[in-house]
Image (cartoon, rainbow, N blue to C red):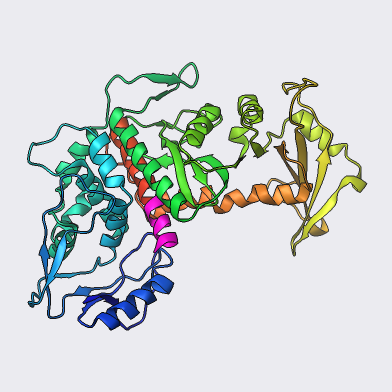
């Protein structure tokens, strides 16, 4: 006997929805046929339809969950041929994500590395993390939404334990907070707390997921797309962001080829996005699995720091980059001095004409050493309105620029740089709008940092499910 997809229409769901319609099949050949069908199609993406698991002529019998889940851990249930109409769930796909979490060994890492004082007979750290993953995969976004899942007896049976109460989860998250942490100074008035030991433990689980995906679908190239995003919050501890709203401004580094978040750093809203990015890159590179032969970096103007450029250009690293350049008056003047013959067509659109050109520009604060191992190139873009129509700011022409140390065709590099919009910006969208990264649970920085990192872990599991299912 086995599990199979029922017939019926499959409806489109958000990126994080993982609830297929399942039933139990008593015929092995039917179960195998349907399982193959799942692998080929219905589980190839995260947007799997929602549905109902109904136990037809069978009952699920729970096995005790092992104290330390192994890499080969299976969900703790057997199948018994008895009817139990109470075991019905609308979240049939959630256990797939949890089983992936266990089989990758991430649950074991959480139990070993996340040491938070709890009741002696309470749930283990991995089970509390699983409860959050299940909550977010099912569409919940706040701790109090756990109450709805707690009433789902079938889901609890599939997972092997009763899901925790909201108060238990809040206590667990606040265990990640440190009152007087070490600080990394981001300026005279801003600082970033160093990770607590439990938060670093979640990072170790992320590394286990990265290694597991790399083992099954290896990539030799890593393109790290780095960007910060604002999480608006009205908690008394939240600080003012550059947009004029209160909140936080975490940074993430996405491995574009694998669609995985390699590293994140949770920050207060008043910490400038354009500082400490060499530190972010160093930590992201340190978290990569073995077997990588080439690393690239893409970013917006927040990464336009001499420290970042010099860090990438170190001979021992040899990291190629394309980063949006600040449009300083000096750079803008050089762009305006270009002759018309320097501009080449990028693409012709109905409303605008996009062009590009290489700019002979060396900034005053740049690296002027003759022995510098890399040549920095400035590539400019120009967007012109047709028929002298105006942009919103009253101009008829807009300019932008990127700096790169890569050789090759300039237009190809400009387009390669644009591709980050489909990686790190997409990750921000999923984290904030389809998962629960924006619904921060606490006024304590460490609890919110854990909430955000666990959302990135969930993002990685859902992305891995697309590749490995």
- In which quarter of the view is residue 82 placed? bottom left
Q: Residue at x 38, y 77 (%)?
A: 37
Q: Residue at x 25, y 67 (%)?
A: 92
Q: Whole-percent x and y of residue 93?
A: 29, 65
Magenta segment boundaries in residue numbering: 460-469
- In which quarter of the view is residue 48 placed? bottom left
- Placement of the C terminus among the 4 image quadrants: bottom left
Choose between 182 and 81: the one closer to the eye: 81
- Whether residue 80 sits left or right of residue 16 in the image: it is left
Q: Residue at x 31, y 71 (%)?
A: 20
Farthest-out residue, top: 188
Total number of numbered discs in the rendering:
0
- In which quarter of the view is residue 112 placed? top left
Q: Whole-percent x and y of residue 161?
A: 13, 54
Q: Is residue 81 visible?
A: yes
Q: Is residue 64 above or below residue 188?
A: below
Q: Is residue 308 above or below residue 7?
A: above
465 in the magenta segment: yes
Choose between 369 and 361: the one closer to the eye: 369
Q: Whole-percent x and y of residue 15?
A: 41, 61
- Placement of the N terminus among the 4 image quadrants: bottom left
Q: Whole-percent x and y of residue 457?
A: 36, 46
Assign the magenta stretch its main secondary structure: helix
- Whether residue 444 sits left or right of residue 83 in the image: it is right
Q: Is residue 216 above or below residue 339?
A: below
Q: Is residue 444 visible?
A: no
275 in the magenta segment: no
């Amino acid at each position: 006997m086995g599990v199979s997809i029922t017939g019926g229409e499959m409806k489109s769901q958000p990126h994080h929805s993982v609830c297929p319609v399942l039933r139990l099949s008593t015929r092995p050949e039917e179960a195998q046929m349907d399982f193959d069908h799942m692998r080929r199609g219905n589980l190839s993406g995260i947007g799997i339809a929602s549905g109902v698991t109904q136990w037809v002529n069978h009952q699920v019998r729970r096995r005790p969950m092992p104290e330390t889940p192994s890499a080969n851990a299976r969900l703790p249930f057997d199948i018994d041929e008895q009817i139990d109409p109470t075991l019905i769930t609308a979240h049939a796909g959630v256990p797939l994500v949890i089983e992936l979490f266990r089989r990758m060994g991430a649950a074991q890492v959480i139990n070993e590395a996340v040491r938070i004082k709890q009741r002696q007979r309470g749930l283990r750290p991995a089970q509390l993390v699983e409860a959050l993953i299940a909550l977010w995969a099912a569409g919940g976004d706040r701790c109090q939404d756990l109450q709805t899942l707690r009433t789902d007896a079938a889901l609890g049976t599939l997972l092997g334990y009763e899901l925790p109460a909201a108060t238990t989860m809040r206590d667990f998250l606040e265990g990640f907070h440190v009152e007087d942490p070490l600080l990394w100074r981001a300026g005279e008035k801003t600082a970033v707390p160093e990770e607590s030991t439990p938060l670093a433990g979640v990072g170790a689980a992320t590394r286990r997921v990265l290694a597991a995906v790399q083992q099954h679908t290896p990539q030799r190239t890593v393109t790290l797309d780095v960007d910060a995003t604002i999480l608006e919050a009205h908690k008394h501890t939240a600080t003012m962001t550059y947009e004029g709203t209160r909140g936080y401004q975490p940074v993430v580094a996405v491995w574009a080829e694998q669609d995985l978040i390699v590293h994140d750093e949770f920050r207060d809203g008043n910490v400038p996005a354009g500082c400490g990015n060499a530190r972010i890159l160093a930590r992201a590179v340190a978290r990569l699995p073995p077997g990588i032969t080439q690393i690239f970096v893409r970013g917006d103007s927040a990464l336009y720091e001499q420290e970042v450029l010099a860090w990438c250009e170190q001979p021992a690293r040899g990291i190629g980059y394309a980063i949006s350049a600040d449009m300083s008056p000096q750079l803008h003047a050089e762009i305006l001095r270009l002759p018309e013959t320097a501009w080449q067509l990028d693409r012709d659109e109905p409303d605008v004409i996009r062009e590009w050109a290489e700019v002979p520009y060396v900034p005053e604060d740049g690296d002027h050493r003759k022995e510098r191992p890399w040549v920095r190139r400035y590539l400019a873009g120009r967007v012109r309105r047709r028929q002298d129509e105006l942009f919103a700011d009253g101009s008829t022409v807009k300019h932008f620029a990127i700096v790169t140390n890569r050789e090759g065709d300039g237009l190809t590099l400009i387009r390669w740089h644009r591709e980050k919009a489909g990686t790190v910006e997409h990750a921000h969208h999923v984290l904030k709008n389809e998962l629960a990264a924006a619904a921060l649970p606490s006024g304590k920085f460490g609890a919110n940092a854990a909430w955000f990192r666990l959302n990135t872990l969930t993002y990685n599991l859902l992305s891995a499910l697309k590749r490995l299912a």
